[in-house]
Amino acid sequence: MLNSGINRISSKELSERMGITASQIRQDLNCFGGFGQQGYGYNVESLYKEIGRILGLDNNFQTIIIGAGNMGRALANYKNFEKRGFKLIGIFDKDPKVVGQKINDLDVRHIDDLQKFTQENKVDIAMLCVPHDETPIVAEKAAACGIKGLWNFSPMELKLSHSNVNKNIVIENVHLSDSLMVLGYKINEMMKANKNELPR
Amino acid sequence: MLNSGINRISSKELSERMGITASQIRQDLNCFGGFGQQGYGYNVESLYKEIGRILGLDNNFQTIIIGAGNMGRALANYKNFEKRGFKLIGIFDKDPKVVGQKINDLDVRHIDDLQKFTQENKVDIAMLCVPHDETPIVAEKAAACGIKGLWNFSPMELKLSHSNVNKNIVIENVHLSDSLMVLGYKINEMMKANKNELPR
């Protein structure tokens, strides 16, 4: 909306765009203070800034990718992350054939250089794109380097073993299957609905 | 739990594993009839089956991938989807250099063969892994072939233009940035909490 030059929007219009109720939008935003005004709605620019502030996007998180396979490369090519304040500054792998390759102007580094790299650079987030079995080991390694957040693409639910580590690191597990199952559910619901509409 | 031989579980234990309240779990499952018994909890095997039935996983959805770039290849290598009832039967691309390559025993086919392929095979879901600008065109093409669900990995919010098409197709947009922003938010909250715990 900001890019399209829209200055203000009502919670009703917002709800139509987002597919949730206006009341839900008002309730959610009220949890953070509420930024709308009765009869006016929301000022788009200030709403954009406030939501960015809530999410901490003004922090400019620095990220690395561990695992330069297909998923790691796909994430490295995502243009949207940097726009949202997440800057990719390093890519790591353990495969000697991959180390030294260039992906989007970044040299793939060896995973053994992770500790040195994190000492020389502020790294907030590691995107874990390594095979399932290697994920826990790599996660512990990243945690030991003081990385604050792990974004886990392995299909396993990642948990760290040391509770004193847990207090200083956040894990976000990306379960792609969940989203696919939601799609499957919606297809079923659609087919049931369409069937009920057939002429008898 | 089923794989670990657990027979029954209380909503309280479930809530600890899932990180949501027991009351929420009971409420959610009650929307579909409720499968627990006061004082007993849930039978794991029947709960597993019921949730699978709700999600329609017994349907055995057949899927294709459109776009054999990094994201498409990463999805083709995901082992979890087939376990959940989503079977990959085709991969399509428009790049002549990629068409004919083998990914996990599947030949990459030319996108021009999509219509013929969908006439000869039941295709329920297309996973869209094409560049941003090409996504709407590819989506319309898939919809015209009678595919019932689109799983969109482009950062754009995909909407189809024809309302008569919309009634027969479901779109699930995967917004990876959303999950990354959630992680950023949690890191901020953690850092605030840790700061407040410092000795004064």
Image (cartoon, coloured by chain):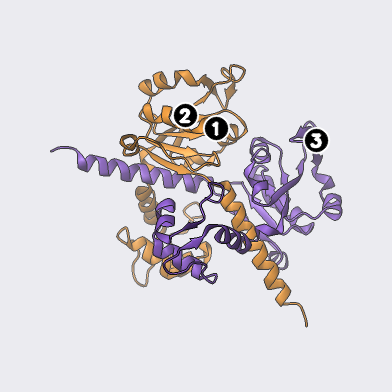
Chain colours: A purple, B orange
Q: Callout 1: helix, strand or loop?
A: helix
- B56 to B107, vertically: above or below: below
Cα distance between the residues tagged 3 and 2: 37 Å
**Crowdedness near tag 2: few (<14), some (14–19) or many (≥20) residues, C-alpha within 10 Å:** few
Residue, disc 2: B137
**Crowdedness near tag 1: few (<14), some (14–19) or many (≥20) residues, C-alpha within 10 Å:** few
Q: Position of residue B153 (x, y in %)?
A: 53, 39
Identify which residue is drawn at 55% across, 51% down: A2
Q: Pick whichever, B160 or A99, lies toward us.
A: B160
Q: Position of residue A148 (x, y in %)?
A: 72, 59
Cα distance between the residues tagged 1 and 3: 31 Å
On residue B133, the disc is 1
Q: Are marks 1 and 3 in contact (CB under 8 Å)?
A: no
Splitting the image into 4 quarters, where does residue A75 fall?
top right
Figure quadrant of the C terminus of chain B = bottom right
Identify which residue is drawn at 52% across, 55% down: A7
